Each structure stands twice: as C-alpha cells, then as structure tokens.
C-alpha cells in the first residue's frame, strides 16, 4: 500500500467518525448553551441542572439518530471491504 493510499484511508475513517459524531456534538452544544442561558437568567448555579438536561438530550438524540448512524457506518464498512483487494496490494 502506498503512503498516499494509507493517508486516503485514514482520512476517510476520520471523516466517517466526524460525520457520525457531529449531530450528537451539535445537540450537546445547543443544549449546553440553552441551559447556560437559563442559569445566567435565573442565577441558579447547580451542576446537576447543567448535567442532567445535557445527558437526557444525548440519550434522546442517540436513540433517534442510531438508525442513521448504523446505516452510515454499515455503508462505510461495506465500501471499505469492497475495496479490500485494492488496499491489500
């Protein structure tokens, strides 16, 4: 395998990981901003108030996005295995 092919393979793997994790990270960011704004407006500085909504949003987002994540990762894996002969050279 040439160095260019290895770099391309690693780049594809990192991009797949990015696209699978990006929706959950964006959801966590948005919920964190909203909870922080609520904390600033109400002057409530409880750490549980910051953690519990974010964890709940992650759980709901994960359950809703799980079928899409599985389809994306399955198609990536199948494409990788389909081109396995090309990478084995």
Image (cartoon, rainbow, N blue to C red):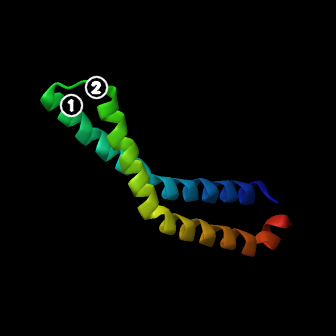
Residue at 45%, 60% in the rendered image = 63
The answer to whether any part of residue 23 appears in the image is no
Element under disc 2: loop
Residue 30, horizontal then vertical, whole percent: 30, 46
Q: Given the current orientation, which residue lies at the most extreme right position?
A: 89
Of residues 59 and 12, the one nearer the viewer is 59
Of residues 18 and 10, the one nearer the viewer is 18
Of residues 13 and 23, the one nearer the viewer is 23
> Are there few (<14), some (14-19), or many (20+) residues within 10 Å of tag 1?
some
Residue at 35%, 39% in the rendered image = 52
Q: Are marks 1 and 2 in contact (CB under 8 Å)?
A: yes
Q: Quadrant of the C terminus?
A: bottom right
The disc placed on residue 39 is 1
Q: What residue is shown with label 2? A: 46
Earlier-in-chain disc, 1 versus 2: 1
Residue 55, horizontal then vertical, whole percent: 40, 43
Up-down: is 81 above or below 50? Answer: below
Q: Quadrant of the N terminus?
A: bottom right
């Amino acid at each position: 395998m040439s160095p260019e092919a290895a770099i391309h393979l690693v780049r594809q793997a990192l991009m797949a990981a990015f696209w699978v994790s990006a929706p959950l990270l964006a959801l966590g960011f948005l919920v964190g901003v909203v909870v922080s704004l609520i904390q600033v407006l109400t002057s409530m500085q409880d750490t549980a108030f910051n953690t519990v909504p974010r964890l709940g949003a992650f759980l709901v987002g994960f359950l809703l996005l799980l079928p899409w994540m599985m389809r994306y990762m399955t198609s990536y894996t199948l494409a990788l295995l389909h081109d396995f002969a090309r990478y084995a050279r």
